[in-house]
Amino acid sequence: MSDSIAAVTRILPVSRETAERLETYVALLRKWQPAQNLVSPHTLGEVWSRHIADSAQLVALFPDVLRWVDIGSGAGLPGIITGILLADSPGARVHCVESNQRKCAFLRTAIRETGAAAVVHEGRIESILKQWQEPVDFISARALASLTNLLELTEPLTQAGVQAALHKGEDFDAELKEASQSWALDLVRHKSLIDSNSLIVEIRRAERRSA
């Protein structure tokens, strides 16, 4: 089967309106890609499975979570996709945190043209999260940093009880071993619905170990 929205509907039913919003996003991604290099060029031929469906897993796994912070949003994967899938859910809001000005311009355009339930926060992750005041339930991050670095970045929110859902690859065991030296973690591994070598790591609790 050719790469299409079917990659999404295999894991999550979507309405016709949501499908149209996702198609609008993909068209925008393709339009902006040559100038912005939003995703790895060799993945464009599989954009629905490699990026859209992979991002959509979060809503499939956590259907009741409506308030997200997506850090290092880049092209909006998964943040904008989460926002599109939650666009018709009352109270839904995805906060996309991104420091790159051009990528922020893309994110704002994508939100405007798709009607995603999302908003952009332009600036460095650590600076924005230290001053965070919005009510949120979950943090998302995809292809951003090691687990140790993600725990450092998100500490202001995790210490306030916010959980996290992180896209991770086959090297996660090594990342976990390193992070566990400094952090006591309560986590759940969810097998990826898209890639057998990947997983979604649900961080339920993260506390620094005493020195």
Image: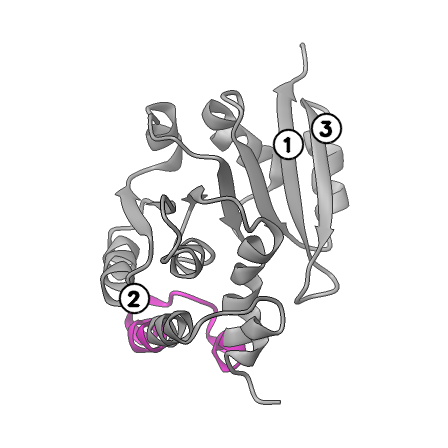
Mark closest to the chain's N terminus, 3 or 2: 2
Magenta region, main secondary structure? helix
Q: Is residue 140 magenta?
A: no
Residue drawn at the location 54% of the way across and 53% of the way down? 143
- Does residue 35 sit above or below 182 in this rendering? below
Q: Which residue is mark 3?
A: 180
Camera-near label (1 vs 3) is 1
Three-letter amino acid code at the position of disc 1: Arg
SS label for mark 1: strand
- Characterize the local packing of mark 3: few (<14), some (14-19) or many (20 or more) Cα atoms within 10 angstroms: some
Instruction: Determine the secondary structure under disc 3.
Output: loop
Q: Position of residue 208 (x, y in %)?
A: 63, 18
Q: Residues within 10 Å of mark 2 (few under 14, many from 20)?
A: many
Secondary element under disc 2, as helix, strand or loop, is: helix
Residue at 64% in and 27% down = 205
Residue at the spot of label 1: 204
Please name the residue that numbered disc 2 is placed on.
Answer: 114
